[in-house]
């Protein structure tokens, strides 16, 4: 489907294998994720935008793939993603000028797949 789908898919096998060795850790992380990312004072959409910004700041391609997909699934618009990425560039400087376009590309890839006729 595309590079960012490939990044996400490449992590599935190793993550599944590691999860078998440390299931309680993964269960705990899943509970934390669900609690942190659910609607509250901030919407799930806003939280995905924050997570995508942090993924850019941390330079984590797997995180970018996950949260770009999450941003699409929660209804983030291209304008919201672009503005958020502008803030990451302002805050992160040079490295963010490399990873923000990666996040933009990932968002567009997942958006195209999400809106494509099935």
Image (tube, rainbow, N blue to C red):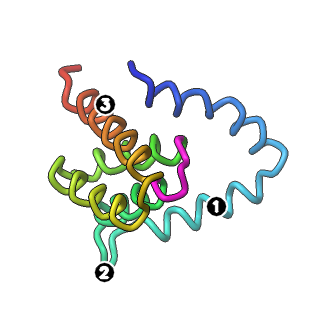
Q: For numbered disc 2, what is the local secondary structure?
A: loop
**Magenta segment main secondary structure:** helix
Distance Cα–Cα, label 3 vs label 2? 29 Å
Say which of 79 and 77 sits in front. 79
Residue ID for mark 1: 29
The image position of residue 53, as x and y in percent, is: 40, 59
Q: Residue at x 42, y 49 (%)?
A: 67
Image-based side of 24 in relation to 84, left or right: right
Tell me if residue 50 is in the magenta stretch: no
Residue ID for mark 3: 109
Mark nearer the N terminus (2 vs 1): 1
Residue ID for mark 2: 41
The stretch in magenta equals: 56-61
Q: Residues within 10 Å of mark 3 (few under 14, many from 20)?
A: many
Image-based side of 35 in relation to 101, left or right: right
Q: Residues within 10 Å of mark 2 (few under 14, many from 20)?
A: few
Instruction: Tell us which disc is closer to us: 3 or 1.
Output: 3
Q: For numbered disc 3, what is the local secondary structure?
A: helix
Q: Judge whether 100 appears above or below 5 on screen.
A: below
Distance Cα–Cα, label 2 vs label 1? 21 Å
Judged from this view, the residue extending furthest toward the front is 94
Image-based side of 77 in relation to 99, left or right: left
The image position of residue 100, as x and y in percent, is: 37, 48
């Amino acid at each position: 489907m595309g590079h960012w789908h490939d990044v996400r898919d490449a992590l599935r096998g190793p993550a599944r294998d590691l999860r078998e060795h440390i299931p309680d850790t993964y269960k705990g992380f899943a509970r934390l994720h669900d609690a942190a990312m659910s609607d509250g004072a901030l919407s799930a959409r806003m939280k995905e935008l924050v997570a995508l910004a942090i993924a850019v700041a941390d330079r984590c391609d797997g995180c970018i793939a996950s949260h770009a997909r999450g941003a699409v699934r929660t209804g983030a618009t291209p304008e919201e993603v672009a503005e958020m990425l502008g803030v990451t560039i302002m805050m992160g400087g040079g490295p963010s000028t490399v990873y923000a376009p990666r996040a933009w590309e990932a968002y567009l890839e997942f958006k195209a797949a999400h809106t494509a006729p099935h």
